[in-house]
Amino acid sequence: MGNALFIVWRESAEAMLVVGILYAWLRQRPDAATGMRFLWGGVAAGAGLALLLALVMLGIASSLSGDALEYFQLAITLVAAGLIVQMVFWMRRHGRTFRNDLERDMAREAGESRWWGLLVVVALAVGRESAETVVFLYGLAGQDDGGIDFPVVLAVGLLLAFATFWLLQHGGKVLSWRRFFRISETLLLLLAGALLVGGLEKLIALGVLPALVDPVWDTSLILDDSSRFGGLVASFTGYRAKPALVPLLALAAYWIAVPLLLRRSHAKAPAPQPVAAPSR
Amino acid sequence: MRLIRPAAAVVTALLAIAAYAEDAPLKLVARDGRFEPATLDVPAGKRVRIEVSNQNAKAIEFESKDLKQEKVIAPGKTAVITLNALKPGEYRYFDEFQQSTGQGKIVAK
């Protein structure tokens, strides 16, 4: 029971993180109504994607279709990583100036084309891991396993997920907006880095990329990524106890390039207005 | 004379197919929340295919950080996992949906 709950929560935490942060951020914007439509549209599309993926996994998870599914999941992972980074840049560019009327209009104009990007990033975040939850729950539903009650797990799991979502919304109120935004940014960038590592490892597993050196080192004595906690850290930061060289270099390059580019886009942005950071 | 090259090509291809067919996938069965055999020996230094058959009533997620593999397998389904050439050593894997009992290792020799 506890195990099942943990799995449902963990699998939905990524989606909650992306949706929760975007929701909190959109609420601050003058064009929130438009954004929300795309946000919930993304959630709906993601649920559809999850069901579709789950059906593939349940129906034809044979060796033949297995590879196609692998490549599809790989593509989803890498595209999601890229879009999340792009989303952080976008939020950074348009988050700080929206009180200024002129700039608000500019942001809205630039934003129109990006709403679809928002929809896709939400759909991928929701669809990616939720498919696994669906397959997992499907297995639970199909059997009577000494006290594991499927509807209860589903209900409590969803409740936990919404509690996470609520905490994120609440966090935006307790912390200053600027600090909440900084933390959100960091969480999203960590997640995108984790997706990058996961995607590259899949490419190595498929034989597309070489690992070069595998493993480079072994830190499983400090934090074992096969343990429950270590696994959680791994899926949200890209941590590996025994990393292969290629994903390791990629993650290092990512963490050098992204902060540098963020700082540059920051420098290019107009000087912050005194009212740029509303305290809520 | 002209036929020698194509004939050689055909023979080479057949040999390649024979070599490929020789490497039947190793079998791993997930049953009652456990993996059988819990320790699977595989040859080191060459690509290996492992057929994981999920005979549980529940879905499993075959996951190995050591092997960099992750695959959800629905109840009653079988999936093939291809491992790149391994260095000799032990590689742990587990069922992420049933981590308390679903543990095993692959030993490359």
Image (spheres, coloured by chain):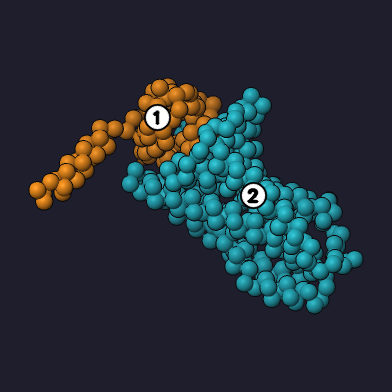
Chain colours: A cyan, B orange
- Residue placed furthest toward the left: B1
Q: Nearer the viewer, residue A88 or A262?
A: A262
Q: Position of residue A152 (x, y in %)?
A: 57, 41
Q: Is residue A253 left or right of residue A128?
A: right
Q: Residue at x 50, y 39 (%)?
A: A211
Camera sees residue A247? yes
- Residue A254, label in figure: 2
Is disc 1 placed on a helix, strand or loop?
loop
Q: Which part of the image, by quadrant, shows the N terminus of chain A?
A: top right
- Residue placed furthest toward the front: B1
Q: Is residue A28 left or right of residue B82?
A: right
For mark 1, does the 10 Å Cα neighbourhood hold few (<14), some (14 to 19), or many (20 or more) residues? Answer: few
Q: Residue at x 59, y 56 (%)?
A: A82
Q: Quadrant of residue B78?
A: top left
Chain on which label 2 sits: A
Q: Which residue is mark 1?
A: B45
